[in-house]
Image (cartoon, rainbow, N blue to C red):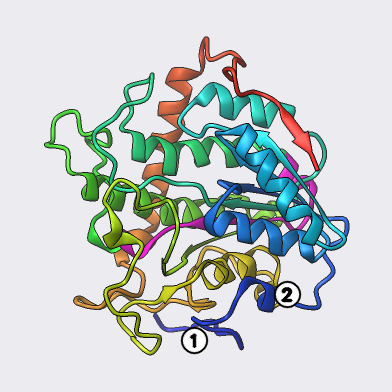
Amino acid sequence: MSRPLITTPFGARSTAAEVLAGLDLGGRRAVVTGGASGIGRETARALAAAGAEVTIGVRDLAAGVRAAGEIAPASGPGSVRAAFLDLANQRSVRAFTDAWQGPLHVLVLNAGVMATPLQRTREGWETQFATNHLGHFALATGLHGALAAARGARVVAVSSVGHVNGGVLFDDVSFERHPYDPWAAYSQSKTANVLFAVEAARRWAPDLIAVNALNPGRITSTRLGRHIGDIANSPASFDATSTDVSWKDIEQGAATSALLAASPLVEGVTGRYFEDCAEAGPHRPGVRRGVAAHALDPGHAARLWQLSTDLLTATATGAGTDTGTGAGAAAV
């Protein structure tokens, strides 16, 4: 990489609150998927504390309403509301985007699943790819008009260092012919998050929409690792000085998302991959940091965009707007 990497005064131990301290986000509207818990909830809280109007997209609307109510009293001048959004259900995604009105300044694609047993959506798509990538792809493209209307919007795709373990299996993204491996499927979906940012940044630059991806670090005490036991959420030995992997608490894990969502320090930056509040360098084998070359490949990014568009188009007919029994929204 010939150009200098982007750095900020913040780092691995910084929190979302510290990153946004002193900023006034009054008048800005944000959507955070998976905002009822974990780093999504903390990202929503930090944005609202700075004055933004935040909508958290959640599968469990009752839990989302409770989370919004708990965030709102301490959120300062902003507001928080919950809206039903099931990323594995294209009807739900379409209902969410169809219902949105007015400009959207910040879209944080945060929700995700990890290393699940083999499951498929109603379309037959493998669940991790469908949720982590296709659901977010449909959400972001469906909200493109609202993002463009903001004239300076930001889209933040939460990826993972797990992307370094493999690229997109373009000829079989749903593991219909290849043996299913939950970690290979997770790596594919997280690579897809970065490739989405690369291609969206290129396509949406004329609309002044900045799109970036990030690795939040390994976060303790979240529900992401619920399918694989305690190993994902409890470091055997927490080493704050390690250069191989950054174990973080939730407040620290949300910092890079908050930076890319709203900090003036990265104004105009697009199509990049960040970790620990700075642009990541190339991945080196044996080190759980950096960005893999396959995730930044512009050819792969364009190919994934076309594949994703084709998959969504093929299932759009008859999708309707049925959002299931959890449909609805509530403001707090």
What type is the residue that disc 1 sits on? Pro
Segment colored magenta: 146-163
Q: How many labels sit on residues?
A: 2
Neighbour tally class for label 1: few under 14, some 14-19, many 20 plus, Cα within 10 Å = few
What type is the residue that disc 2 sits on? Pro
Q: Is residue 38 left or right of residue 56?
A: left
Q: Position of residue 313 (x, y in %)?
A: 47, 23
Residue lying farthest to the top in this orientation: 318
The secondary element bearing badge 2 is classed as helix
Whether 154 is among the magenta residues is yes
267 to 302, vertically: above or below: below
Residue drawn at (33%, 75%) of the image:
289
Q: Is residue 263 left or right of residue 272?
A: right
112 to 13, vertically: above or below: above
Q: Judge depth for marks 1 and 2 and give the one in front.
A: 2
Q: CA distance from mark 1 to mark 2?
A: 18 Å
Disc 2 target residue: 264
216 to 118, vertically: above or below: below
